[in-house]
Amino acid sequence: MKPVKISRTVAATAQAVFDVVANGRNYGRAIPEIDTVQFLTDHETGVGARFLETRHFSGAQALFAKVFGLSATESEVTDFEDGRMVRLVTKEAGALWHTTFTVTPNESNDEAQLDMLVRIEPISLMGKLVTPFLQPAAVKGITADVEAVKAYVEAGSPLDGTPG
């Protein structure tokens, strides 16, 4: 499957945007479909942080989630550059989902560019068979997540801790 990249300009500082995407708890608050975030490590940010995220879906996405067990997924931070980039890896539906958030401030630092890049790497026969069918749902879901982060940050919603 071809990588999916969604970009948005957010009317907030780059640090405020990063603090949402780099912490699973803040991200969980920003995304309406996320019901719970449970950390599996002592730390919530930075390389090695792992968390279990539970989502609810509707319509066709709910059917896909039920069939492929996508409602609860475990993610691990595998790369982290404070204030700039965080990469998560999630194993689901016979594939590794590599999600990279990159945040870039504009010159005056009153806006930031948020890029979310998702690359799906099939690791089983099921993954090879299923990932082509996941493309439309993945694009829709990734776009919705980026829009939700943008709205959450621009609303000045509360954040837990700071990355690092």
Image: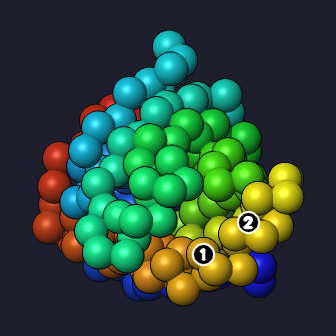
> Circles 2 and 1: CB distance less than 8 Å?
yes
Specify whether 78 is left or right of 107. Answer: right
Residue drawn at (63%, 37%), measured in percent from left and top? 76
Whether residue 36 is visible here, answered yes or no, is yes
For numbered disc 1, what is the local secondary structure?
helix
Whether residue 106 is visible here, answered yes or no, is no
Residue drawn at (14%, 67%), measured in percent from left and top? 155
- Which one is nearer the viewer's eye here, 159 or 129? 129
Above or below, comparing residue 131 to residue 56 in the picture: below
Residue drawn at (37%, 76%), measured in percent from left and top? 60
- Which one is nearer the viewer's eye here, 142 or 70? 70
Q: In the rendered structure, which amino acid carries the disc numbered 1? A: Leu
In the rendered image, which quarter contains the N terminus?
bottom right
Task: Kindly report the distance in space between the C-alpha atoms of the residues bearing marks 2 and 1.
Answer: 10 Å
Residue 120's label in the rendered image is 2
Above or below, comparing residue 155 to residue 106 in the picture: above
Specify whether 61 is left or right of 98. Answer: left
As drawn, the residue found furthest toward the top would be 42
The number of discs equals 2
Q: List x then y, in percent, for residue 153.
A: 26, 64
Specify whether 41 is left or right of 148. Answer: right
Residue 57's label in the rendered image is none
Q: List x then y, in percent, for residue 158.
A: 17, 47
Specify whether 150 is left or right of 132. Answer: left
| Residue 117 in which image quadrant | bottom right
